Image (cartoon, helix red, strand yellow):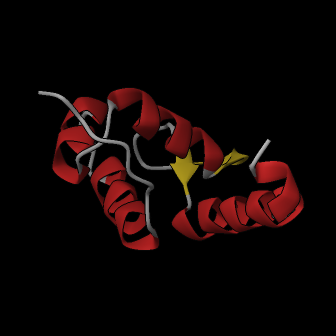
């Protein structure tokens, strides 16, 4: 199955959180939201605080923390100037 590029939205992050908390395999989570497994793994890493464990003794995924980190990255990256885009 060929996948198209798409960004993960906050609703997707909440879906990942509930499925991950329920012990669902990463491949099944990826199929459910329509992204690759590597995208889900990256997202799970983005939403971990590195301290808190869930009931499955894995690092807990927090969709709010992941969303905050995405916003900070976009803000830090900034917007490219228009004159540099046509080069």
**Residue 43 place in picture, x, y as percent:** 52, 45
**Residue 55 place in picture, x, y as percent:** 42, 49
Residue drawn at point x = 86 percent, y = 58 percent? 83
Asked whether 66 or 87 is in front, the reply is: 87
| Any part of residue 24 in sight | no
Asked whether 81 or 57 is in front, the reply is: 81
Outermost residue, left direction? 1
Indicate the quadrant containing the N terminus: top left, top right, bottom left or bottom right.
Answer: top left
Q: Is residue 70 left or right of residue 19?
A: right
Q: Is residue 54 left or right of residue 27?
A: right
Residue drawn at point x = 76 percent, y = 51 percent? 85
Determine which quarter of the picture holds residue 5: top left
The count of marks equals: 0
Residue drawn at point x = 37 percent, y = 72 percent? 11
**Residue 46 place in picture, x, y as percent:** 63, 46
Q: Is residue 9 left or right of residue 68?
A: left
Position above or below: 61 against 38: below
| Any part of residue 49 in sight | yes
Indicate the quadrant containing the C terminus: top left, top right, bottom left or bottom right.
Answer: top right
Determine which quarter of the picture holds residue 51: top right
**Residue 2 place in picture, x, y as percent:** 18, 29
Asked whether 1 or 54 is in front, the reply is: 1
Q: Is residue 37 left or right of residue 62?
A: left
Determine which quarter of the picture holds residue 7: bottom left
Residue drawn at point x = 67 percent, y = 60 percent? 70
Asked whether 21 or 31 is in front, the reply is: 31
């Amino acid at each position: 199955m060929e996948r198209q590029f798409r960004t993960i939205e906050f609703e997707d992050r909440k879906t990942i959180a509930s499925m991950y908390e329920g012990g669902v395999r990463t491949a099944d989570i990826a199929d459910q939201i329509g992204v690759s497994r590597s995208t889900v793994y990256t997202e799970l890493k983005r939403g971990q605080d590195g301290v808190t464990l869930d009931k499955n003794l894995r690092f807990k995924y927090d969709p709010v923390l992941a969303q905050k980190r995405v916003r900070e990255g976009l803000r830090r990256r900034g917007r490219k100037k228009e004159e540099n885009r046509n080069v």
